[in-house]
Amino acid sequence: MDEEADKKPNRRIPWWAFAVIGVIAVLTLSQFVRGGSGGGAEEVSLRTFALEVQAGQAERLIVEGDQLTLERADGSKIESRKEESTSALETLQQLGVTQEALQKIEIEIEKEGSGFGATLAVVLGIAPILFFVVIGFVIFRQMRNSGGGLLNIGKSKARLTGVNGVKPSVVFDDVAGIEEAKLELQEVVEFLKTPEKFARLGAHVPKGVLLVGPPGTGKTLLARAAAGESGVPFFSISGSEFVELFVGAGASRVRDLFEKAKAASPAIIFIDEIDAVGRRRGVGLGGGNDEREQTLNQILVEMDGFENETNVIVVAATNRADVLDPALLRPGRFDRTVMVDPPDVAGREAILRVHARGKVLSPDADLSAIAKLTAGLAGADLENLLNEAGILAARTGASAIGSKELNAAFERIVAGPERTSRVLSAGERRIVAYHEAGHALVMESMPNTDPVHKISIISRGKALGYTISLPETERVLRSKETFEEEIAGLLGGRAAEELNCGGITTGAANDLERATALARAMVTQYGMSDELGLRTFTSNTNGFPDWTQRQEYAEGTALKIDEQISGILERAYERAKATLTERWDAVARLAGGLLEQETLERPEITRLLDGGASADIPCLEESAA
């Protein structure tokens, strides 16, 4: 405890600084009191002063420079000032004071600038300088002790964990759903524990490991787990913390970080969001001689300068590996790239079970069902889902987290919070009901689309209603037919609006955006256009705006791309309309059920699709007639 107290920076202002400031304040106050009251003296004109001297009632005349002070017999005083060019006696005689009157009083001449007043004037003159010197010294001392400020601008800001025998907070058992990535880093852990095993065979572990994956997939957690398993010092820093306003500060921080890691080896350096400093050099605006590129150059030098026996491994994470400089990825630096993908259904269930530790779950909480429902969600999303479920359970006073809270938390994450304050008119509710029913029927009618899990016309977030589909199996590859059917399902809501009394609204805005994005990807990325063939038409600028880049295809080709995108959308829309027209009675049943219950689950959806009482459909009948 004493050693830790000694290491803590002393941010208290020293006692003598308060003493100096207090003395200055006292002297200043005394000067104001003395000057403001004149020491009990009354300021009068020079003529009045001469008349008092001539009257003979004064006992003493004090002359100090050009200031004249007269003390009366009763102890009172008066003051006045004379001209500097004449003496006090000459001034008084010129104003009518006789020699006899002057001989009756005691005349005391003080040296100008002497006594307490002069000392106080000197002190007050140097007081501002002394004050700023004290403040400057205090700031300098705090900067030196706190490890920050200009003197330490080139010092690394990396956070150090895993030292002094502290038990690691994260190990590999706390990481789930990314088993392949864990296996890759287990070699790093084994090397740090038993480096002689590799050295005996002449092999060495990669100097750098780059973790690449979407946000929230567990890259940082995986690096912390590797440090926890190996039990070595773990230096963690963000790429943006290297960049500084001062030129050369970033490179200096890189040197300081690697020096500390080498001194503490074996160790792990973790650089999160390395794309902040590792972007490709010489691309885009700003030229090449900037602070970020100097920092990157220093990272390259430090990693290339590692000796095999140093036992320092650099682990970095990014979700933009496409913008990194090639020199950073070459063998000898980051020579191993580990992909951290979103988990599959088994991985999601394992992640849910890890984050369910310490939470009270009811017997009906089926984590495997939630894992199937949450396709595409990353580990951070799943952790948030369980936390939201816990909050909902606490809000309603439940004793445990059940399936109801888990499903409600999932809907809150994917669609937004429920908006009970948004009140729709009867006509708007009917439009929303037919819109969602159109989505559901088209998706259920297509052979390659996922079955509908839930339909609701309760407003959440920006959506007036939503339709949730549940994939039966995990899909890795998607065919052209799957894309076309998915686009048809997205346009089913708009088609149902048009068939229901022939009107269209703004409710399909998001559906149109998503459908257009899928159609554009089919044409420009996946080569799924018969007319344009196998060529791709996407441009990769590596994340940098390049105003000099030329379009890599002709204007005529751009026109064909637009035509192909429009053709895919039009065909999907006609397909959706044909499907809805053929089974409009099922659409009406779904819409009626939504208007009555607001939310339909899978069993109710299946029952309404298979048959039952049909709602009125006058608009479709009239248009068909």
Image: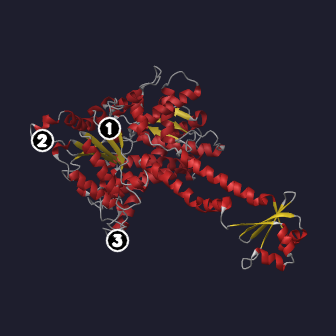
- Residue at image x 33%, y 37%? 224
Front residue of 314/490: it is: 314
Q: Earlier in the sequence, mark 3 or mark 2?
A: 2
**Residue at the extreme right:** 55
Q: Which one is in front in this view, the residue at disc 1 or the one at disc 3? A: 1
Question: In this view of the protein, which residue sits in the foreground, 293 or 464?
Answer: 293
Of residue 517 and residue 289, the one placed in the foreground of this image is 289
Q: What amino acid does circle 1 point to? A: Leu
Mark 2, mark 1: which one is toward the viewer?
A: 2
Residue that badge 1 annotates: 222
> Circle 1 — which element?
helix
Tell me, yes or no, whether the two marked residues, 3 and 2, touch with CB atoms within 8 Å. Answer: no
**Coloring scheme of the render?**
secondary structure
In primary-sequence order, the first of circles 2 and 1 is 2
Q: Residue 203: which disc?
A: 2
Q: Residues within 10 Å of mark 2 (few under 14, many from 20)?
A: few
Q: Earlier in the sequence, mark 1 or mark 3?
A: 1
- Residue type for callout 3: Thr
Q: Is residue 191 visible?
A: yes
Q: Residues within 10 Å of mark 1 (few under 14, many from 20)?
A: many
Name the front one of labels 3 and 2. 2
| Whether residue 348 is situated above or below residue 66 in the rendered picture | above
- Binning the other alpha carbons within 10 Å of mark 3 as few (below 14), some (14 to 19) or many (20 upward) gives few
